[in-house]
Image (spheres, helix red, strand yellow):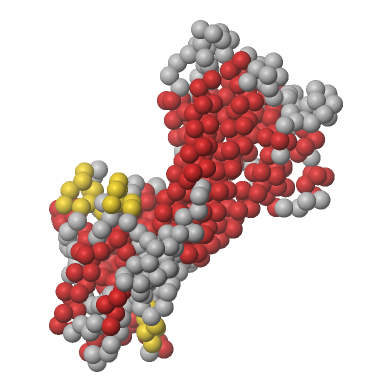
Amino acid sequence: MQFVEQKEVTIGGDTLSLEDVVLVGRYHYKVCLAENSKEKVIQSRQYVEKLLAEKKVVYGLTTGFGKFSDTYISSDDAKDLQVNLIRSHACGIGDPFPEEVVRAIIFLRINSLMRGNSGIRLQVIEMMVEMLNKGVIPMIPEKGSLGASGDLAPLSHLALVMMGEGEAYYNGELMEGGAALYKAGIAPVSLEAKEGLALINGTQVMTGVGAIACWDAMKLAKWADSSAALTTEVLRGVRQAFEPETHEIRPHYGQQQVARNVQMLTKGSQLMTNQGEVRVQDAYSLRCVPQVHGATRDALNYIHDKIVIEINSVTDNPLIFAEKNKVISGGNFHGQPIALVMDFLSIAVAELANISERRIERLVNPQLNDNLPPFLTKYGGTNSGFMIAQYAAASLVSENKSLAHPASVDSIPSSANQEDHVSMGTIAARKAAKIVENCRSVISIELLCGVQAADYRGAHHLGDGTKWVYSTCRKYVPFLDTDRVLYKDFQKAADFMKNIDVLREMEEQFTE
């Protein structure tokens, strides 16, 4: 997937992609609303006002919430109902979400509301666009959502700022929400009937976290292929394991894709060997790269498709179908579809780190690394080289095993058992994002061990693609001659693996 050359993303036109979420969240692309999508939003709001005028009993318009759904609320109290909803539900706990995640959350909420099934005024949505484009970033604590009835607690912190309350970042400074709006030249909104509920009853927090995590994981899968190809090469791996015949008779798409990538990266290599030349077959962490990485790639493709559906869905309650004269109380806010795929993402990406750490061990272990210097240092004893780098990778892999325990198998009833099954999808998404971050660090360690080994083997002997991998790493991190502080090197590698320009260039190293 290539980055598009644009600086603005339109909501309400074509279906949004994972890339759109990243462009707006991470790279601060502007957002605009498609004119042809505004009319349905206006009609939906007119229908809500008609229901209010007729004093219809509708959940969230003229009733309380959750267990209070049977409590009638008069039209005179409708505005107080919405304000009290936001204040009472803003129960987030813990550290704030990163800016890129909050921007993604707002972006996805706008997209859902613009479908015209939420009964919210257009001017409220336009205010959210203005917040994104002017850089008012609500402080949203990352904990406190059950992932059903939507991401109620975290989304309430977004709505608080829209009301001129809560806290927000503006120009990198945390301040009162009203002050942030004032500095940006944005007037706070006075919420009317249904609008508070429309803002907070949805899955956009878990989906925002998950969308960025999935995007990063898909890019990381390519780096994993690159690091594996480099490691296999410097360990004088057997090239036949990647030839197409084996993979054609077990035709998983991801497996075939990875085998082709490794073949292409190592094309022209003078270090790869033939069966029986050095050894008959390699250890699993080298020989089974297509099977292991490929399974992760197949999982990521499935996860990607489910997230794209959720990005473009309406997930609040009740839903307004003005053209059919209907209001339906349903369960689209339930996060189970995202909870399951986020747990799947955790497991799939954890395995990329798991097998990468085993390759790191082979690179540094003198009993396994085919006569490379122990721990990849010429001065072993007085210098430790990459000894403790492997420890760090092992620690991250072990942490991932704990984080990969599925969140979606748990449920705790809430709201006096009215909401008696919840998804824990936001917890699943947060854990998946942490595993992706850990995996990136593990692969950064493998890359630096691999290029260190390549210097001992002779980098000019590398294949066409792995030469690019080597030179890219060496632009940022020099050869380790004698011991130095390594954590900064690992961070540099993790950073360039996310760099948009390096990502663009890396795309050219793959056929798919």
Residue displayed at 45% across by 59% down = 410
Percent coordinates x, y for residue 393 in the rendering: 52, 31
Taking the view exactly as shown, the residue that stands out farthest to the bottom is: 54
Q: Is residue 31 visible?
A: no
Q: Is residue 409 visible?
A: yes
Count of marks overlaid on the render? 0
- Given residues 29 and 327, the one toward you in this image is 327
**Residue 488 falls left or right of residue 452:** left
- Given residues 452 and 152, the one toward you in this image is 152
Q: Does residue 505 lie above or below 42 as drawn?
A: above
Residue displayed at 50% across by 22% down = 388
Residue displayed at 60% across by 53% down = 299
Q: Quadrant of residue 149?
A: bottom left
Percent coordinates x, y for residue 432 in the rendering: 47, 49
Residue displayed at 25% across by 43% down = 172
Percent coordinates x, y for residue 312 in the rendering: 46, 66
Taking the view exactly as shown, the residue that stands out farthest to the right is: 276
Q: Quadrant of residue 425?
A: bottom left
Percent coordinates x, y for residue 315 in the rendering: 41, 70
**Residue 232 falls left or right of residue 117:** right
Q: Does residue 368 lie above or below 143 as drawn?
A: above
Q: Does residue 396 lie above or below 44 as drawn?
A: above
